[in-house]
Amino acid sequence: MPHPLDLADLRSRVQDRIDTELDRWEVELAEIGPDVADLTGPVRTLLQGGKRLRAGFAYWGWRAAGRDDDEGAISLAASMELFQAAALIHDDVMDDSETRRGQPAMHRALARTHAERVWHGDPDRFGVAGAILAGNLCLGWCDDLYADSGLPTEALAAARPAFERMRGQLMAGQFLDIVTSMRPWHRLDDAERIERSRHVIRYKSAKYSIEHPLLIGATAGGASESDLAALSRYGLALGEAFQLRDDVLGVFGDPEVTGKPAGDDLREGKRTVLIARTLAGADDVATTKVDQWLGAPDLGAEEVESFRELIVDTGALDGVERDITVGAEAARAALAEATGVADPARSVLADLVDVTTARTT
């Protein structure tokens, strides 16, 4: 059975569109000099990978509105991947991540380039500065590709508010994540920790991963107000379930699949729903261990395994698995309420519920 994102050759066509745009932009920037390749090269590398989830939801949002396959819709979908690239580059800087998709994170790759060439100054500072600029480039290119997608002007104008909402809410959501990571958790009760963690993933990930791309495509395609409302509910519920799954994989996932070292989310100290539920089920001894281990950059393999066992023993893993199931069921119910969505879009969106919440995604 083909992957739902490979129907209509979607992922290969999106990649071709991205490559064409990168070729064009590299030519435009070439007049600045060869040093610019140090900036655009890692961007191209980053854009060779990924699930193409956001592109898929944008495209199938267009099809959900009853529209036929269209190269303009492929370009619209590709623009979502450029936005995703910007978000990943900046997120890795803020989290001080080492890797992304099995490769050095952008700021790490640039710092390595600096060190290998024995340049003056601090390699890490150079890497962070370059990554910020690379992310900004991707944001600009995303907007360019959206505007130049080839879809009718009125379609793009109709979807522009959703596009702008996606950009604004993600930036504010990223800041909310930073704020939450700085505030002392011991001042909050269990329910507050869980709710604040869910609030962060809603605006940092869930909306821009699924809900907003889906609504951008569906609005551009002219979907009815009732279908848009149902697709919004579908996207938000599935987006939260998808991020909860990602958080589980960040702790228990196979590095060959996730592209990140095992336990990296624990070393980075991410205050996820999984950790909030762990604290809710922990006694004083276990709470002390969480405080000691969470955010420790030198957390070893044995400590990671002990942390995993603690997460399981407190019932946190089972609790998050239930949350994921509830979100998936809510997404299916919302899709059923989008009565104007016909096949193949309905079947693809239904299949994507399973794909995005699978334990081995």
Image (cartoon, rainbow, N blue to C red):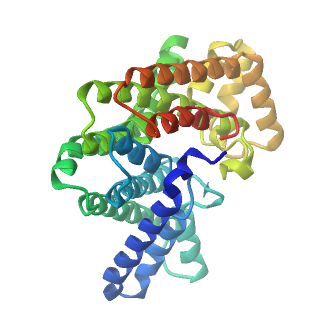
Q: Quadrant of the N terminus?
A: top right
Up/down of 301 relative to 139, above or below: above
As drawn, is 139 to the left or to the right of 35?
left
Which quadrant of the view contains residue 226? top left
Residue visible at 52% across and 65% down in the picture? 124
Q: Quadrant of the C terminus?
A: top right
Residue 75, image x, y percentages:
36, 60
Residue 111, image x, y percentages:
54, 69
Residue 227, image x, y percentages:
31, 27
Residue visible at 59% across and 72% down in the picture? 112
As drawn, is 102 to the left or to the right of 125?
right
Foreground pick, 162 / 227: 227
Residue 110, image x, y percentages:
52, 70
Up/down of 88 relative to 19, above or below: above
Which quadrant of the view contains residue 335? top left
Which quadrant of the view contains residue 171? top left
